[in-house]
Image (cartoon, helix red, strand yellow):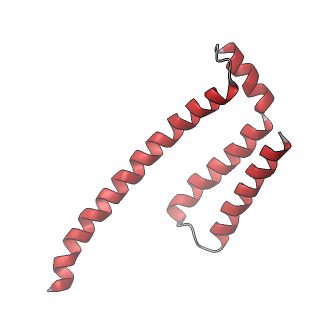
């Protein structure tokens, strides 16, 4: 459990460092900070998550964490796909303008 807390804390520090160095855009900083703080909270609450999993009838705690993570990451991936599609359309419109 201590390894998990150390790893999640290092991830939080990395996000803060990347934010300070302007490697992450302001649009996405909030999302990554929330995720990294959530990771630290999950690492600190692993015994409680095990109890919650048992009450939900899930015998393997990591399965519960995987399911929750999947439900969080899937909408994020869809959001980024939509953003990339919008940028692709904008680039296709800008190319002829720049050519003129």
Q: Position of residue 79 (x, y in %)?
A: 40, 49
Q: Quadrant of residue 98?
A: bottom left
Q: Quadrant of residue 83?
A: bottom left
Q: Position of residue 38 (x, y in %)?
A: 68, 43
Q: Is residue 58 above or below residue 81?
A: above
Residue found farthest to the right? 2
Nearer to the camera, 96 or 54: 54
Nearer to the camera, 100 or 30: 100
Q: Quadrant of the C terminus?
A: bottom left
Q: How many marks?
A: 0
Q: Residue at x 62, y 27 (%)?
A: 63
Nearer to the camera, 30 or 88: 88
Q: Position of residue 69 (x, y in %)?
A: 57, 37
Q: Position of residue 52 (x, y in %)?
A: 70, 20
Q: Residue at x 71, y 56 (%)?
A: 12
Q: Residue at x 63, y 32 (%)?
A: 65
Image position of 71 (left or right of 56): left
Q: Quadrant of the N terminus?
A: top right
């Amino acid at each position: 459990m201590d390894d998990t807390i150390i790893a999640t804390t290092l991830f939080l520090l990395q996000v803060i460092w990347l934010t300070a160095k302007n490697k992450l855009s302001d649009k996405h900083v909030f999302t990554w900070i929330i995720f990294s703080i959530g990771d630290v909270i999950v690492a600190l609450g692993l015994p409680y998550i095990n109890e919650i999993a048992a009450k939900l009838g899930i015998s393997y705690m990591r399965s519960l964490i995987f399911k929750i993570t999947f439900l969080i990451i899937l909408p994020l991936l869809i959001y980024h796909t939509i953003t990339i599609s919008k940028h692709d359309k904008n680039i296709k419109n800008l190319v002829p303008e720049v050519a003129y």
